[in-house]
Each structure stands twice: as structure tokens, then as C-alpha cells.
Amino acid sequence: MKKLCSTLLLSTLFTASSLADESTYSGWGNLHINWQEWGHGASDSDFSQGLIGVEGGMNFEWGEVFGFYDFEGIDRDSGQQTATMNLQAHTYLSDSGLSLFTKVYNTQGTEIKETNSFLGLGYTEIKGDGWWFTPCLPPTTRRFTTSLPPLPTRTDLMVRL
């Protein structure tokens, strides 16, 4: 599943970049390596991890697209990493600033497989010189989660009998 999500995201980003012609207003992208520590701030968690990722976005006459792919847990042993991808778009509804907002967010790992998809209304006209804010109201959210439980021990099997 990781390979499928990775291929889907990269194919989408390459397809979007190949569509970049005179109808493209702007675009950006980056490759990043990060260290996350969740115990600083409002959380008391001691979770931390290293990750490597790619992200990018483009503006077209018809709308905006943004996506990222993160390979998380690069500091952990093989098999304990996760892959997270996000692909979202605002499709403009006339010149009003309103948009149809669509998003797919997916995380795959050894202990969790989760996909969230959103469909709603967005607004794309809150922006300035070098910044933008595009809020959305997703009235429809679909979530599919598969948590993989640990393998049962012999005691677990005896209790179930």
C-alpha cells in the first residue's frame, strides 16, 4: 500500500508539473529533512522522530493544488516507519473566491493504515504579498482506519476458548 500511495502522489505531482504552461500562475516545491519533538509546547508526549519529505503546490486558472509525501521514522529500525501523504485541491467556483475543496490524507505503517477524504467548500481570496490563507468547511468527511492489533499470545488464545 505504501508503494501505491507513493506512486499515486508522485504521479500526481509530475502530472501537475507537466500541465504547467501559460495557464499556470505560480508553483513551488521543496525537499525537506526534519526532526519532530512532540513534547515541547502543549503536549506532554515524549514522542520524537526524523522524517524526509517532498511537498509542492501550483496555482492554475481553474484552481489550486497542494500535496506532500513524508517518510517518517527514518531514525527507527526498518519496519517501524510510516508513510504519510496528502493531496488537496481548491477548484474555483467562478470569481467569487469560493471553491470546491477536496482532500485525501493517508498514513500507512506497521500499526496503522488510515485514509481520510474530505469534500467541502473553501475560500481562496485571503492573501497578500507572499502569503495566503485558504480555509475550508468540509461538510463531508469519510474516514477509513485499520489498526493492526498485536499478534495474540498463547494466554489470549486460551481466554478466547
Image: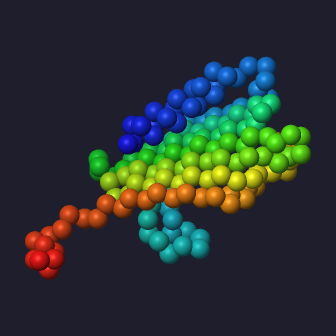
- Count of numbered circles on the image: 0
- Quadrant for the N terminus, please: top left
**Horizontal and vertical percent for residue 157?**
13, 73
Whether residue 26 sits left or right of residue 55 in the image: it is: right
Residue at the far bottom in the pictured view = 159
* View extreme (right): residue: 96
Left or right: where 139 falls relative to 107? right
Q: Residue at x 75, y 53 (%)?
A: 121
How is the rendered protein coloured?
A: rainbow
- Whether residue 28 is visible here, answered yes or no, is yes
43 or 102, nearer to the observer: 102
Viewer-closest of 66 and 52: 66
Which residue appears at 57% of the width and 32% of the height?
A: 12
Image coordinates of residue 160 in percent, x first then y, are 16, 77
Along the horizontal axis of the image, is 11 left or right of 24?
A: left
Q: Is residue 31 above or below residue 76?
A: above
Q: Quadrant of residue 94?
A: top right
From the viewer's side, name the closer residue of 130 and 138. Answer: 138
- Residue at 29%, 47% (x, y): give it: 78
Quadrant of the snapshot with the C terminus: bottom left
In terms of image quadrants, where is residue 129? top right
Task: Give the x, y percent position of residue 90.
Answer: 73, 43
Residue 71 point in image, percent of width and height: 44, 45
Left or right of residue 117, residue 123 in this image: right
Q: In this view of the protein, can residue 51 be seen by the observer?
A: no
Residue at 37 percent across and 52 percent down: it is: 109
